[in-house]
């Protein structure tokens, strides 16, 4: 039994890791344009929206997060609910209520692409303020 499992291990690893992709955020996120942040408080059922301009510490912190999180994305066709949403032109990042984030953006053919990635929920807490 163990030998049978070991024989298929390379195939399973290829399937799991073959689905993980790198996203070059510089192709989809304009580092010269402002972005909006919407923060939803599900207990109060309120959403607050504000704009983050380039050359601010929050902008730099967010773009640094994007830059350091380009690996490990998986395509995902599902719909998600989150508490923090970042929008800029066609780019959307949604921090999921569970662990992780979802990004969506149009590709070169204007078809919308959507990916998810696991990360610490606290990574984007700085956007709540």
Image (cartoon, rainbow, N blue to C red):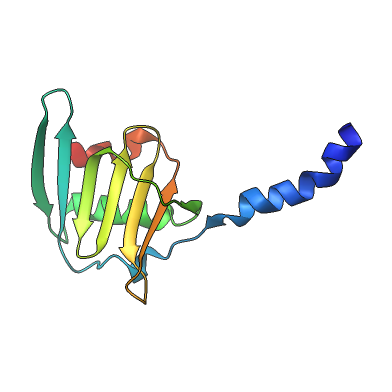
Asked if residue 129 shows in the view, the reply is no
Quarter where residue 96 is shown: top left
Toward the bottom, the furthest residue is: 109
Asked if residue 16 lies left or right of residue 119, the reply is: right
Q: Is residue 13 above or below residue 22?
A: above
Asked if residue 21 lies left or right of residue 113, the reply is: right
Q: Nearer the viewer, residue 17 or 25?
A: 17
Q: Is residue 62 above or below residue 122?
A: below
Q: Residue at x 29, y 51 (%)?
A: 93
Whole-percent x, y for residue 15 in the image: 66, 52
Asked if residue 25 shows in the view, the reply is yes
For the C terminus, the quadrant is top left
Asked if residue 99 lies left or right of residue 91, the reply is: right
- In this rendering, the count of numbered labels is 0
Whole-percent x, y for residue 30 in the image: 25, 68
Q: Residue at x 57, y 55 (%)?
A: 19
Whole-percent x, y for residue 46 in the image: 9, 32
Q: Nearer the viewer, residue 79 or 96?
A: 79
For the N terminus, the quadrant is top right
Whole-percent x, y for residue 25 in the image: 37, 63
Q: Residue at x 44, y 46 (%)?
A: 117
Q: Residue at x 43, y 52 (%)?
A: 69
């Amino acid at each position: 039994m163990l030998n049978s499992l070991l024989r298929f291990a390379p195939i399973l690893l290829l399937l799991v890791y073959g689905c993980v992709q790198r996203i070059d955020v510089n192709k989809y996120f304009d580092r010269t344009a402002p972005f909006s942040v919407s923060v939803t408080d599900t207990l109060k059922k309120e959403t607050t929206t504000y704009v983050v301009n380039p050359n601010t510490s929050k902008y730099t912190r967010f773009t640094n997060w994007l830059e350091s999180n380009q690996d490990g994305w998986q395509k995902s066709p599902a719909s998600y609910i989150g508490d923090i949403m970042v929008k800029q032109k066609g780019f959307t990042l949604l921090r999921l209520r569970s662990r992780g984030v979802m990004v969506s953006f149009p590709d070169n053919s204007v078809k919308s692409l959507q990916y998810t990635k696991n990360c610490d929920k606290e990574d984007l807490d700085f956007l709540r303020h």
